[in-house]
Image (spheres, rainbow, N blue to C red):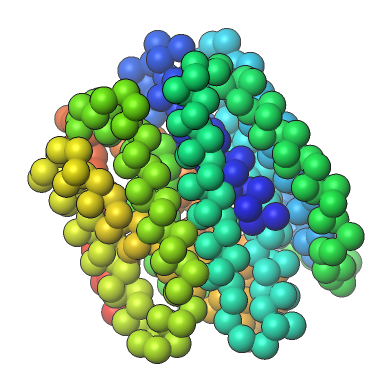
Amino acid sequence: MFFMAGLSFSSWASRIATVQQELDLSDAALGGVLFALPVGLMCSLPFSGWAITKIGSRNLLVAALIVYSISLVTLGLAQNTFQLIICLMVFGFSSNSVNISVNTQAVAAEELYGRPILASFHGLWSLAGFTGAAIGSFMIGHEIIPLYHFIFILVIIIVVVLFTMPYLKHDKVANAGPVFVMPDNSLIKLGAIAFCSMICEGAMFDWSVIYFKKVVLAPIDWVGTGFTAFMFTMAGGRFVADWFSHRFGLKRTMQLSGMLTATGLLIAVIFPHLYTALIGFLFVGAGVSSVVPMVYSAAGKSKTMQPGVALAAVSTIGFMGFLVGPPMIGFIAGLASLRASFTLIAMMGISVTVVATKAKI
């Protein structure tokens, strides 16, 4: 399920530049359109945590993932800016529901397994992003329109959901409680760390291809390599994150991750050439790889809130960064440049280090 969620989002990310060109959107206009994603997410905030307590994470995950993949296809059907905005809102709404429910399932699996494995689940999400980027590059190279590309992904997801449904954990459901529960101070700090890291992550998903096209001036066959490089080290980093965190401690892992992210982004900004930018994006992938899984694992062990509710609170705060970052880049690029936007995003990497240093983790 992590893999399918990542495949859906990365499929959209790999075709953003194509959709921008088809609808003749400027960078600033694209930033405004992409803001529909966090709007959709915000609309889902009171729903997702409540739905888990009411119908369970299993049922929510299945329903939300199906809606998520169908809304991906509608993005390929959009013929104008208004239609794209509406479709992106639905895409954002369902993405948050998938994110919360699949992480709740993962925390339950981690408890059964008896040792940290959550980062490896996120590694599968990143591996799906790498796969989605590769599929996207193939589709672009063969001039296959986004609609046919997205239908292909929809079919894959539906088949996988049908086969994996029986193996998902049935969690206990409770009577409907409050629609929104305020997280405690420790969860807010965890959410802040995830927020800063996921701003960087979201920026890479939505703008890496455009950065390589307009700033790096990469050949058409190479515009997707920056995103691919980012996803490669992000996936690899998550598969070793559990061991690294156990060996060096959670705080040191967070601090190093933030500095790697900032360093990579600044390399790509200061030296906007093909190979140096690729090296920078490799650093960024390694930097963001461990932050969110470690935050979610810590939140799932909260002593003040149930795992599903705690995850809903932290993942919602963090995922807002994932969706707020891309439109913020578009607005800044319209006022200044893409290089200026990426410089600001690098400051978010530094913020991860600062907040992690002050937090009790």
Residue 21, position as x, y percentages in the image: 40, 15
Query: Relative to residue 61, is residue 321 drawn left or right?
Result: left
Answer yes or no: is residue 141 visible.
yes
Query: Relative to residue 143, is residue 207 drawn left or right?
Result: left
Residue 279, position as x, y percentages in the image: 23, 52
User: Count of labels shown?
Assistant: 0
Residue at the image point whose x is 72% and y is 51% from the top: 47
Q: Quadrant of the C terminus?
A: bottom left
Query: Relative to residue 172, is residue 249 drawn left or right?
Result: left
> Is residue 125 depicted above or below 214 in this figure?
below
Query: Relative to residue 218, is residue 56 drawn left or right?
Result: right
Return the residue found at the far left: 270
Q: Quadrant of the N terminus?
A: bottom right
Answer yes or no: is residue 324 visible.
no
Residue at the image point whose x is 46% and y is 82% from the top: 243
Residue at the image point whose x is 53% and y is 62% from the top: 123
Q: Nearer the viewer, residue 224 or 268?
A: 224
Residue 13, position as x, y percentages in the image: 48, 35
Residue at the image point whose x is 62% and y is 20% from the top: 147
> Is residue 147 depicted above or below 128 in this figure?
above
Q: Nearer the viewer, residue 311 or 218?
A: 218
Q: Nearer the viewer, residue 328 or 6?
A: 6
Q: Nearer the viewer, residue 307 or 239?
A: 239
Residue 203, position as x, y percentages in the image: 37, 44
Name the image quarter holding residue 290.
bottom left
Name the image quarter holding residue 112.
bottom right
